[in-house]
Amino acid sequence: TKKANKVAIKRMKQANILLLANKKDEFYEEILKALWGYISDKLNIHLSSLSKDNVEDKLEKYQVSPTLTKEFIELLNDCEFARFAPGNDYQDTMDRIYTKSLNIISQMENSIKH
């Protein structure tokens, strides 16, 4: 769990490279890996067992605010939707999701106490 943030930041750096290269599919895939990987490592849930429901339950047990939990789940949904949504105006969406991902990982790091 101590390396969760370090690994997530490494993935976010890779996502930023993909963002700058305007590689939409790879960008969203890397963001999702960063988010799911972070929460998996932080909450000690095996990746194969991860679901939005059990993440919500675990975050509640760690007394993470319901607002932050909701934002995290919404971010996962936004990434999944944006990844497959048609359209050409996705650069702003990618920028917003990247920034939001960094903020949420940072907030989670401060909220989850072991």
Image: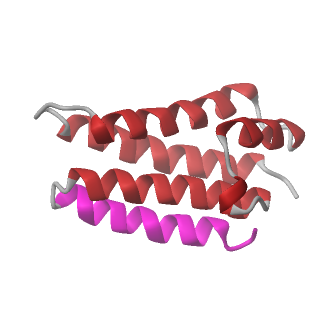
Q: Residue furthest front?
A: 48
Q: What range is drawn magenta here?
A: 1-20
Q: Is residue 12 above or below residue 83?
A: below
Q: Residue at x 42, y 62 (%)?
A: 12
Q: Picture coordinates of residue 19 (x, y %)?
A: 24, 55
Q: Is residue 15 above or below residue 24?
A: below
Question: Majority secondary structure of the magenta segment?
Answer: helix
- Judged left or right of residue 91, residue 30 is right
Q: Picture coordinates of residue 48 (x, y %)?
A: 67, 59
Question: Is 29 part of what is drawn in magenta?
Answer: no
Q: Residue at x 38, y 55 (%)?
A: 29
Q: Choose top left, top right, bottom left or bottom right for residue 8.
A: bottom right
**Front residue of 101 and 28:** 28
**Front residue of 45 and 62:** 45
Q: Quadrant of the N terminus?
A: bottom right
Q: Residue furthest left?
A: 88
Q: Is residue 86 above or below residue 99?
A: above
Q: Residue at x 32, y 36 (%)?
A: 82
Q: Picture coordinates of residue 34 (x, y %)?
A: 51, 59
Question: Is 8 part of what is drawn in magenta?
Answer: yes
- Marks counted in the figure total 0
- Judged left or right of residue 61, residue 47 is left
The way the protein has been coloured in the rendering is secondary structure
Q: Quadrant of the C terminus?
A: bottom right
